[in-house]
Amino acid sequence: MTTRLRVAPSPTGAMHVGTGRTALFNWLFARHTGGTFIVRIDDTDTARSEKAFEDDILAGLRWLGLDWDEGVGVGGPHGSYRQSDRYGRYEEVAEKLIAEETAYPCFCTPGELETRRAEAEAAGRPPGYDGRCRAIDAVDARHRRNAGERAAVRFKMPRPGTTEFVDLVRGEIRVDHQHVDDFVLLRSDRRPTYHLASTVDDVDYEITHVARGEDLLPSTPRHVQLTLAMGGKEATYAHIPLINGPDGKRLSKRHGAQGVTEYVDAGYLPEALVNYLSLLGWSPSGDASIFPVTESIRLFELTDVQKNPAVFDRAKLDWMNGEYVRALPSDRFNDLAAPYVEQAAGHPLSPEEWSRFEQLSPLIQERAKLLTDIGDQVRFLFVDHDTVVTPETIGIIVSFPEAKPIIENAIERLTSLAEFDHESIETSLRGMLDELGLNARKGLQPLRVAITGSTVSPPLFESMAALGRETVLDRLDAARSRM
Ligand code: GLU
């Protein structure tokens, strides 16, 4: 049997990291088993679904590198893979089930349902559908519909009965149908419910494994029974634990970025986010936490997904991203950095400016956790002295008691250097520290602020070398004259 897995996002919001994780687990298992990964769009909620959200979701999947073999945008034997294009098919199934008497028309109006639900609640009975229309004779029901009476379609849960299945994550599940009401398949306006559309698609697309969020576990007995009533083959289910924030509450906006696009914009690398998401609820044996996706594919099993909620820890993700940034080949790092560098510079870089960046880039790569950290670190390479030597930076410089002699001494030494390279600059300025009797922190900080405009910068000697003598002396001179 070859495996067929799907991710089925609803385009009612932007691509969420939770959707990314669900997609990833399905994709990993499909790739691990040499099966097929499918992307379906669950857009039956027409009021809330938007094409822009669908585009965002598909772009997010592509950015993460989760390529799909069938589905929206790539095609396959099942049409568009959008539920909104399959209403006819859902009606056909619902009508067939009515004909076979495993489903029935329900004539209850919303008002009647609400009144009886409230009565049941007041009497301490379960609030689900009370089954009133199940008792209507099938022939009578057909006459009423033929006469134009509006009806929803409900599934006839086999009663008495139980649904039993082995969930790959949660183990044996057994649900008595006493606790499952006769749920709606088609609304009276003929729109399908999630249960109908999702199950019909899973059966038609011959999905072998349904791996989805644990919040959908209560729906699964319904989907199993509906599958059997359709004569379909029951899928294997795996309900993946939800993702919590570090405070133990379900991950939400409060915990920071949720959308995959936000991670793109914040300068994360897709391979780092994929590595991080793969560990949200799954861990391969051994304690390595950084491994390439090929390794996850090799090791991934749905049965190794844990039951407990996963905890989204942004600090760990940032650390992991830094590891991936450091591991990039330097020319790839430079390519990825280029847009951030140009944005910081505020203009496209000239070849000479680019070579300034390239001189420093190994040091930037060492230190950056996120690609968005790069701009602030290198801006000083491309701006004029008025941007660096501002009243504010002068304020910081003069807060060092020895600032004036330091700057004067440095100007003198740097002017007379034979070579303006990192080693010569370092030897010369260490000589200055000795001469003035200052430690590096006190003695170099005023120079750093005058040259880079900040108390935090890439290493100072290398930064000076990258800037070039003329610019360094220009800034020191500007600082001296404004102090
Ligand atoms: N469309 C559902 C959602 O976005 C998923 C349905 C499923 O996986 O069965 O939550």
Image (cartoon, grey):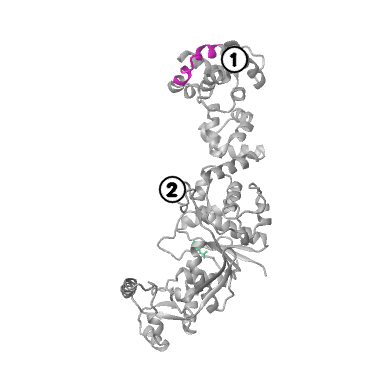
Q: Which residues are magenta?
A: 395-408
147 or 422: which is nearer to us?
422
The image's mark for residue 157 is: none
Q: Earlier in the sequence, mark 1 or mark 2?
A: 2
Number of numbered discs on residues: 2
**Quadrant occupied by the C terminus:** top left
| Residue at the far front in the pictured view | 124
Q: Element under label 2?
A: helix
Q: Element under label 1?
A: helix
Cβ atoms under marks 1 and 2 closer than 8 Å: no
Q: Residue 181: say if magenta.
A: no
Would you say 156 lies left or right of 121 here? right
Would you say 323 lies left or right of 121 here? right
Amino acid under disc 1: Leu
194 or 250: which is nearer to us?
250
The residues bearing labels 1 and 2 have C-alpha atoms spaced at a distance of 48 Å
Asked where in the image residue 330 lies, by quadrant, the reply is top right
Asked where in the image residue 425 lies, by quadrant, the reply is top right
- The residue wearing badge 2 is 254
Q: Is residue 174 above or below residue 280?
A: below
- The residue wearing badge 1 is 433
